[in-house]
Amino acid sequence: MNGVFSWLEDSWFAEAIRGTAYLYPMLESVHITGIALLIGPAAAFDLRLLGLGRQALRVTTAAKHLLPLSHLGFMIAASTGVMMFLSSPSLIADRGSALWKLSLIVLAGVNILIFHRRTYRFVANWDMGRSAPIAARVAAVVSLTSWSGVTVAGRLLAYT
């Protein structure tokens, strides 16, 4: 992998990120905005799955309004995250928190896939006024935990 990382580090794109004044801090700022758009609505949806607002808000209504914001946040965070990684992949990859962050992103993605392919398909049975099934509640806990862990691991990239 070192050869790939060296090639990426020497690319014109990586050099532009490192060499352009204020570009990296701007990417970080946009990345944080993307994280907020990703995790805020996802956490609100997860809390609905865990029973908050069960009598007041349908799960499908929460999904319709919150998940598109979360998807936008993911696209922003992922694209800016890749750009920041490309600026110095060798340095970042050597940090222990990088593997944790990537692993937790994969876990969150698998959790989302399983939830939407299996559990959410039967949402009509528990959309309003009923407790979400255990699979939905487990998915909510995994989501809250994994995205929180991604955030912590991302912050640790700067220090470990």
Image: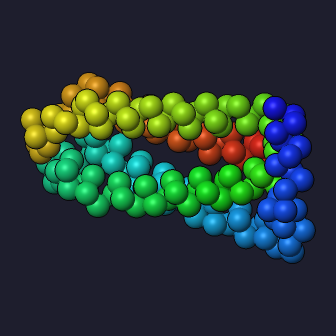
The residue under the point 84% across, 56% down is 11
Q: Position of residue 37 (x, y in %)?
A: 49, 60
Q: Is residue 3 above or below residue 27?
A: above
Quarter of the N terminus within the rendering: top right
Q: Is residue 70 above or below residue 33?
A: above
Left or right, 44 with reference to 33: left
Q: Is residue 99 above or below residue 129?
A: above
Q: Is residue 82 above or below residue 19?
A: above
Q: Nearer the viewer, residue 31 or 13?
A: 13
Quarter of the rendering containing residue 131: top left
- Image color mode: rainbow
Q: Position of residue 49 (x, y in %)?
A: 28, 40
Q: Extreme bottom residue here?
A: 21
The residue under the point 82% across, 39% down is 4
Q: Nearer the viewer, residue 94 or 146?
A: 94
Callout count: 0
Quarter of the C terminus within the rendering: top right
Q: Nearer the viewer, residue 49 or 102?
A: 102
Quarter of the rendering containing residue 28: bottom right
The residue under the point 35% across, 54% down is 67
The residue under the point 77% across, 43% down is 157
Left or right, 62 with reference to 139: left
Residue 43 shows in this picture = yes
